[in-house]
Amino acid sequence: MTAEEVSKRRRATYLAILSFGIVSMFGDMVYEGSRGLVPDYFAYLGATSVIVGVIGGLGDFIGYALRLVSGVLVDATRSYWFFIFLGYGLIFSIPLIGFSGLEIAILLVLIERIGKALRSPSRDTVLSVIGKEVGAGRAFGFHELLDQVGAVLGPTIVALIMLSTSNNYRFTFGFLAVPFGLMLIFLIYTYKRTTSVPLPARLEKGQKNEKMTRPFYLYTFAVLINTVGLIPYTLILFKVSEIVSPAHLDWIVPLVYVLIQGVDAPAALLSGYAFDKFGIKFLVLPFVLSIVAPLFAMFNSGLELLIIAAAFFGLVLGMQESIYRAAVSQLAPVSSRGTAYGIFHIAYGAGLLISGFVYGLLIQFGLPFVVALVYVLATQSVAILLLLRASRWHKVSAAS
C-alpha cells in the first residue's frame, strides 16, 4: 500500500470517528444536559439523598447490566446498527421528564439508561474496528472529546434556561427535544457514511466466538473495585443543591456539571494518546486520582471543596470513558467484543450502584470523615493491585 493510500485510509477513519462523535455530541446535549439537573429536580420533588444516590446508581447499573445482554445479542446477530438506532431512539424519554412527577420521572431516567445499554456495545465495537487504523486510544479519546462537547453544551444550555426562566423545569427539559431531533438526522447520515466498514460476519453453523482471556476478567474486576470507591457525580451535585437551593440559585447545579464535563473532554483526548504509548499500566493514574474526589466531597459541605471534587471527578471520568474502554479492545478478541463490552459495563454499572448506596448512606447519616477516608483508600488500593496484575498477565500472554 502506497503512502498516499495509507493517508487516504487514515483520513477516512478520522471522518468516520468524527461522524460518530457528532451523533454522540447531540445525544449528550440531551441526556447529559438532563443529568446535570435531574438530582436537583428529584430534590425539588421531595427525594432524599439516598433516593438520589440509589436511583442514579440503579439507573446506571440497569443500563450497564443490560449491555451484557445487548453485547451477547449483537455478537450473535451482528445487527450492530439495529441496536445503535434503537438505543439512541430511546433518548426521547428525556424531554418528557419535566412534565412528570417523581415516580414517572424515575421511570423516564431508567428508560434512557436502557437505551444507552442497547447502543453502547454495538457502537463501541464498530468504533474499535474503525479505530484500529489509528490506534484504539486515539479513536476512543477523539470520540470522547467530541462526545464531551455536547456534554458541556447540554448542561450549559440547561443552566442558562433555568436562569432565564426562573427555574422552569418543564420548559428546560422540553427544550432538549431540539438536539434530540438533530441527533437523529446525523445518526442517519453516519450510518450511510460507515456502511462500507468491514464488521465481523455472522457465525457459520457450529462456529463459536473466541473466549475472553484471564487478564480481561481481572482487569474488569479492577475497574469494578475502582468504581465502588469513587463517589458518584449525582451525590456531588446533590450536596451542591443542598447549599444553593435555599438561596434559589439552582442554576448553579448544572454549571458544576458543566465543569465536570469540561474537564472530562481534554482528559479523554490526552489520556487516549498516553494509553497508546504506555498501554494498560497507564490506568494506574486514574485509579490513583479516584482517591481525590471522594475526599474533597466528603470532608465538609463547603461549595469550594465540592467544586474541587467535581473537577477531579471529571478528570477521572474522561479517562473512564476513553481509555477504560480502549483497554477492553486490547484484552478481548474482536469476534466477542460486543460480549466483552457488555461484561465490562455490567461490572462498571455494579460499581456505580454500590458507590451510590454507600456514599448516600454516608451523607444521609453524617458519618465521620474518617469512615470515608478508610473506605476510599481500601478500595482504590485493592483496585490498583488488581490492575497491575492484569497488566502483567496480559504482557505474558501477549509474549507467548
Image: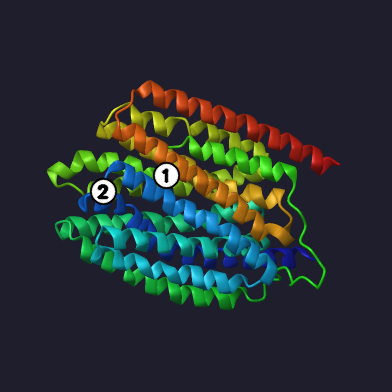
- The spot of residue 60 in percent (x, y) is 45, 52
Q: Quadrant of residue 81?
A: bottom right
- The spot of residue 149 in percent (x, y) is 42, 57
Q: Quadrant of residue 177?
A: bottom left
Crowding near pointer 1: few (<14 within 10 Å), some, many (20+)? Answer: many
Residue 374 visible in the snapshot: yes
Residue topped by disc 2: 47
Mark 1 or mark 2, earlier in chain: 2
Look at the numbered disc 2 and give the secondary structure of its residue: loop
Measured in 3D between alpha carbons, the distance from the residue under mark 1 to the one under mark 2, in whole angstroms, is 29 Å
Residue 277 in the image: above or below residue 126? above
- The spot of residue 368 in percent (x, y) is 33, 23
Residue 267 visible in the snapshot: no
Query: Disc 2 marks which amino acid?
Result: Ala
| Image depth: mark 1 or mark 2 in front | 2
Where does the C terminus fall, quadrant-wise? top right
Residue under the point 39% across and 21% down = 370
Q: Quadrant of residue 134?
A: bottom right
78 displayed left or right of 185: right
51 or 190: nearer the viewer:
51
Residue under the point 46% across and 49% down = 265
232 or 205: nearer the viewer:
205
204 displayed left or right of 252: right
Query: Disc 1 marks which amino acid?
Result: Val
- The spot of residue 349 in percent (x, y) is 51, 49
Confirm or deny contact between disc 1 and disc 2 (CB under 8 A). no
295 displayed left or right of 389: left
Residue under the point 53% across and 44% down = 319
Crowding near pointer 2: few (<14 within 10 Å), some, many (20+)? Answer: some
Residue topped by disc 1: 263
